[in-house]
Image (cartoon, rainbow, N blue to C red):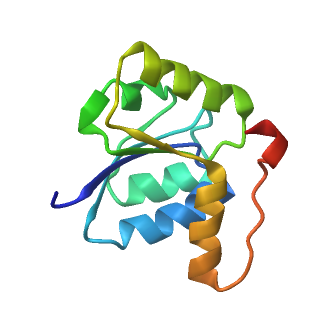
């Protein structure tokens, strides 16, 4: 593997902080960023770096096993459930769903302090 192929669902503040780290990594290829809102900081950052953006997360998911990791930074339980259902329905055994808590860990490590995200343990 030469690089990680990553799709990001959610483009708010938490996603923006994570996206800043990912675009700086030579071994990461961000295929697209999805958010229902088209004017978020994450969408603007993605566009600045030439990363495709969409309002439909299925635009990313339809890449199937060509996608290594899909990062859910929405903090929305129904989105997580839909992601899991999609992977099961399409029998995708390759793509890993990265939960918002792992994103919080990555951003916290990079900042050297705990970063809170809007999702909670009870919605996982």
Q: Position of residue 77 (x, y in %)?
A: 72, 32
The answer to whether 87 is drawn above or below residue 95 in the figure is above
Residue at x 65% of width, y 74% of height? 108
The answer to whether 110 is drawn above or below residue 80 in the figure is below
What is the count of numbered marks? 0
Residue at x 38% of width, y 66% of height? 23
For the C terminus, the quadrant is: top right
Q: Between residues 37 and 102, which one lies in front from this camera angle?
A: 102
Is residue 121 left or right of 108 when viewed as pictured? right
Is residue 39 left or right of 4 when viewed as pictured? right
- Considering every residue shown, the one lying at the far top of the view is 89
- Considering every residue shown, the one lying at the far left of the view is 2
The answer to whether 99 is drawn above or below residue 76 in the figure is below
The answer to whether 62 is drawn above or below residue 1 in the figure is above
Location of residue 112 (image quadrant) = bottom right
Q: Position of residue 57 (x, y in %)?
A: 49, 29
Q: Position of residue 63 (x, y in %)?
A: 29, 29
């Amino acid at each position: 593997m030469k690089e990680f192929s990553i799709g990001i669902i959610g483009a708010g503040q938490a996603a923006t902080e994570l996206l800043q780290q990912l675009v700086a990594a030579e071994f990461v290829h961000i295929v697209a960023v999805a958010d229902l809102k088209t004017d978020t900081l994450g969408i603007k950052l993605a566009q600045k770096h030439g990363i495709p953006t969409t309002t439909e997360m299925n635009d990313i998911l339809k890449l199937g096993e060509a996608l290594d990791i899909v990062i859910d930074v929405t903090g929305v339980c129904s989105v997580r459930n839909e992601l899991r259902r999609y992977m099961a329905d399409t029998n995708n055994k390759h793509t890993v769903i990265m939960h918002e808590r792992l994103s919080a860990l990555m951003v916290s490590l990079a900042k050297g302090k705990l970063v809170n995200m809007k999702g909670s343990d009870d919605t996982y």
